[in-house]
Image: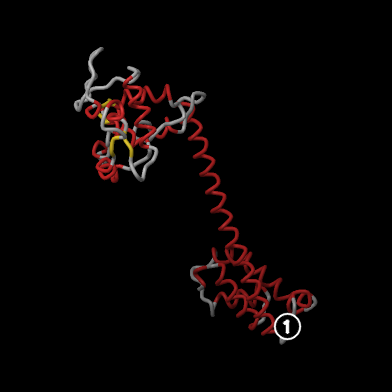
Amino acid sequence: MTESWKDDNCAAMKAHYAVYSIPHAAALWCGVTDENIEQVLSEVTQVSSTGFGRSIWKHPDAPCVEPRSRAIAEAIEAGELPHGREDGKPLGEGDSAAYERRHILGRNLKIWMEKEFPNDKPAFLFDDIEQNSHTGINADSYRSLKAERDALQRRVDKAVKEFVTLRKDKETIEADRDRLKLLAIESTGLSQDTNDFELTKSKSWNELNRLVKLAVTDYPNWKGNQRKVQKSGNLQDWLTGTIGANNREAEIIKKILSDFYQELR
């Protein structure tokens, strides 16, 4: 039994209650991955050691950290984005944390970002449905569209598999044709350079071709009436008797039949 609760990382819940410092939120907004976030945060510096610049951060290899930390810092300063200290608890009206200690809750950051930057939906705050949706498409519509797309993809995959199968069948038929041609040439004494058109003028070729088609078509019915198929016994008798092949033609036909029917291999 699969214990699904072990696989649930509660991503949506974590994002809702997560607490971010300004540089942390800015770095994640820039797309810094979880495995690199600690290193990046250890390398960020304030743009100024005094005043409002203490809440704006920059990184030498991630230039977008500065404008995004500035956007967050300005929203906090303007009272548009609730902030607190390290515990994330929003401060009351008129209260303010030191620039370096300012932290924000994920849910408040998400609400602010939806309003101010509706086209930005970073993965640390928005799930895949939200990231692939816009104001004209709600979650249900997205799921419906995704289901239709997945159904179409399955149809495409099925068509590709069928094409591959048909291609293999075509190659098998062509290989059988070439093998039959070679066997016919060997049995009739025709030249190896004989082309397909010249073969159609050969009575021996046309007769062998007719016998092969007849044998391949009738074999399943004949086999159904036999207790056991013996290639040098009843099969040989059937080919030379009912089908009308001579001994040499019967040997050729048996080789061709083995390409179609596994029990003769």
Q: Nearer the viewer, residue 242 or 9?
A: 9
Q: Of the residues shown, which amino acid type is indicated by label 1?
A: Asp
Q: Nearer the viewer, residue 122 or 1?
A: 122
Q: Residue farthest to the top? A: 93
Tell me which residue sits at (52%, 43%) in the image.
153
Tell me which residue sits at (54%, 44%) in the image.
155
Quarter holding residue 211: bottom right
Quarter holding residue 117: top left
The vertical placement of 43 against 49, above or below, is below
Name the secondary structure under disc 1: loop
Q: Nearer the viewer, residue 225 or 247?
A: 247
Q: Residue farthest to the front? A: 50
With 246 as the anchor, is 10 left or right in this view? left
Q: Nearer the viewer, residue 181 or 160?
A: 160
Classify 10 Å Cα crowding around label 1: few (below 14), some (14-19), many (20 and above).
few
Query: Which quadrant of the figure contains the N terminus?
Result: top left
Tell me which residue sits at (27%, 30%) in the image.
54
Query: Horizontal and vertical percent for residue 27?
Result: 33, 37
Query: Horizontal and vertical percent for residue 17?
Result: 26, 27
With 196 as the anchor, is 169 left or right in this view? left
How many labels sit on residues? 1
**Residue topped by disc 1:** 193
